[in-house]
């Protein structure tokens, strides 16, 4: 029954679109932007207990940040969709032993951050705010956190960023939206209404939001790690991303899935940032 719920909701929105395309697209985007999970559980809060916690107030919402103090370079960690800063537990443990200065943030509507909805552009603005305050040298982003980080660095000319690490990151928004449209069973009319919503509220069609348009101002060395059997973000996205960075290194993994939370991946990260 749970598998049928998206189709039932999608059918309702398809009917609504016949009478009010604007309202149908607004609801569709709201559902697309509202995480079903990602808030911190009690055991995850314990994982973050050792960090210095600070709220960044951005657009009247509190963005939770976590700071593990170290003497070496400052590293910012940006998690992905329906996750939170606790996903970095094992990597943080490794980086702390190496004395790096570590910052993590919870995305809007995730972890202990405020807001009810999320989108990658809003996330990128929050990442930009964190980069400004913490004077970051290295950024590590997982999934849409990687894409949002690239957008933040590109849009705001963060020349201090020397290295960018993208873990299972999407190369564009189109694939994400198409997957959502297919999952919900939306009609072409709803899809067109969603495009109109993007133009009205974000200034561009979804096709604009691609790595090709958000890599030109990034001079950092880029490490791309992507699993060949990633079922969430296809490996072809990694191949597309690498085309747009002159100083890049692509590492293919097999069997680690989308999360990439393994010792082998962490070893690649440490080798890259230490070089």
Image: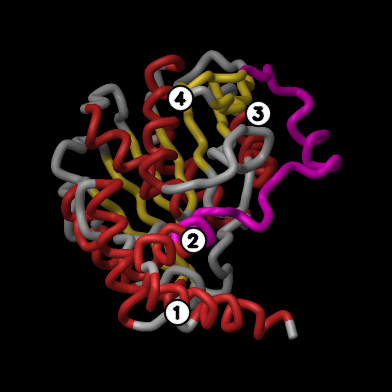
Vertical placement of residue 89 versus 206, above or below = above
Using the numbered discs, state the Cα–Cα distance from disc 1 to disc 4 in whole angstroms. Answer: 33 Å
For marks 3 and 2, give the one nearer the viewer. 2
Look at the image and tell me in which quarter the C terminus lies: top left
- Dots 2 and 4: beta carbons under 8 Å? no
Q: Is residue 265 magenta?
A: no
Q: Of the residues under marks 3 and 4, which one precedes in the sequence?
A: 4
For marks 3 and 4, give the one nearer the viewer. 4
Residue at image mark 4: 59
| Horizontal and vertical percent position of residue 106 | 59, 36
Look at the image and tell me in which quarter the N terminus lies: bottom right
| Horizontal and vertical percent position of residue 36 | 66, 58
Q: Of the residues under marks 2 and 4, which one precedes in the sequence?
A: 2
Using the numbered discs, state the Cα–Cα distance from disc 3 to disc 2 in whole angstroms. Answer: 46 Å
Vertical placement of residue 30 versus 15, above or below = above
Residue at image mark 1: 14
Residue for point 33% across, 65% down:
194
Q: Which mark is residue 27?
A: 2
What range is drawn magenta here?
29-54
Q: Of the residues under marks 1 and 4, which one precedes in the sequence?
A: 1
Task: Describe the element under mark 2 as helix, strand or loop.
Answer: helix
């Amino acid at each position: 029954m749970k598998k049928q719920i998206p189709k039932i909701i999608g059918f309702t929105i398809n009917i609504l679109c016949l009478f009010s395309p604007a309202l149908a697209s607004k609801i569709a985007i709201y559902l697309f932007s509202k995480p079903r999970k990602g808030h911190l559980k009690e055991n995850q809060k314990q994982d973050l207990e050792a960090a210095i916690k600070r709220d960044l107030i951005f657009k009247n919402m509190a963005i939770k940040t976590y700071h593990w103090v170290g003497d070496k370079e400052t590293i910012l960690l940006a998690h992905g969709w329906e996750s939170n800063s606790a996903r970095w537990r094992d990597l943080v443990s490794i980086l702390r032993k190496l004395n790096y200065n570590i910052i993590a943030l919870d995305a809007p509507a995730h972890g202990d951050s405020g807001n009810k909805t999320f989108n990658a552009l809003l996330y990128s603005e929050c990442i930009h705010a964190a980069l400004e305050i913490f004077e970051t040298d290295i950024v590590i982003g997982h999934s849409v956190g990687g894409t949002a980080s690239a957008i933040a660095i590109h849009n705001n000319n963060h020349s201090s960023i020397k290295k960018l690490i993208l873990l299972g990151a999407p190369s564009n928004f189109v694939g994400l939206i198409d997957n959502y449209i297919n999952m919900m069973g939306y009609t072409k009319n709803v899809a067109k209404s969603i495009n109109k919503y993007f133009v009205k509220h974000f200034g561009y069609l979804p096709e604009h939001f691609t790595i090709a348009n958000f890599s030109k101002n990034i001079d950092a060395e880029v490490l791309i790690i992507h699993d060949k059997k990633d079922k969430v973000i296809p490996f072809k996205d990694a191949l597309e991303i690498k085309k747009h960075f002159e100083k890049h290194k692509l590492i293919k993994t097999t069997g680690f899935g989308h999360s990439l939370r393994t010792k082998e991946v962490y070893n690649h990260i440490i080798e890259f940032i230490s070089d």
